[in-house]
Amino acid sequence: MKILNLQKEKLTELFRNPKFVHISLIVGVLLIILIAFSECMSSAPRRETVTVSEQFTETDLYAQSIEEKLIEILSHIEGVGKVEVLVTAGTTEEYVYAKEGKTGSNSSTDEIVVIDSGNGKQALTEKIIKPSITGVVIVCEGGDDSRVCERVYNAVRAALGIGASKIYVTERQ
């Protein structure tokens, strides 16, 4: 009991000290400002975090698919060991919709053909134009041998229908 009374007296003495009162007021004001500032910051619009997998577009997936196919083909070419491929595509997929011509007394118009599917009405797709390939980089074992490079260039040109100026082949370290 005596210990409690002693501690109570020390606390009372501390609270009556002017320095303690000033420091307590300053800390209290700072805490209020900090709380108000954090409330302002939390009410600001938040940016949504996008994961890497959500950032891939159809074009990226198309390029990745070509990369995988090229790796498979090129790894079977004589002189090509381990191979890595980077494909860049310049545009996105383009959809061409079926059109129906209508002629009137003075003019003719083309209207997109719309079909009724289970999910509602949709435009009838006539064809899908895949993205254009703007470049291919191949890093492979044997890339310093001119005969291997020529085989790789010919394989990529034939597979993708692109010119040699869009293809770069180099030795793998």
Image: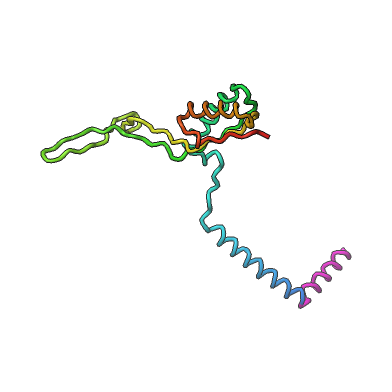
Residue drawn at point x = 26 percent, y = 33 percent: 99
Q: Within the magenta stretch, is there residue 134?
A: no
Q: Going by the image, does 127 lie left or right of 56?
A: left
Q: Please say if 97 is above or below 76.
A: below
Q: Residue furthest right?
A: 2
Q: Which image quarter: residue 82? A: top right
Q: Going by the image, does 117 lie left or right of 100?
A: right
Q: Quadrant of the N terminus?
A: bottom right
Q: Which of 150/52 is in front?
A: 150
Residue 6 percent coordinates (x, y): 86, 68
Residue 137 percent coordinates (x, y): 56, 36
Residue 128 percent coordinates (x, y): 38, 32
Residue 46 percent coordinates (x, y): 53, 53
Q: Which of 128/40 is in front?
A: 128
Magenta stretch secondary structure, dominant: helix
Residue drawn at point x = 52 percent, y = 27 percent: 154
Q: Please say if 17 is above or below 82.
A: below
- Segment colored magenta: 1-18
Q: Within the magenta stretch, is there residue 11?
A: yes
Q: Residue furthest front?
A: 146
Q: Quadrant of the C terminus?
A: top right
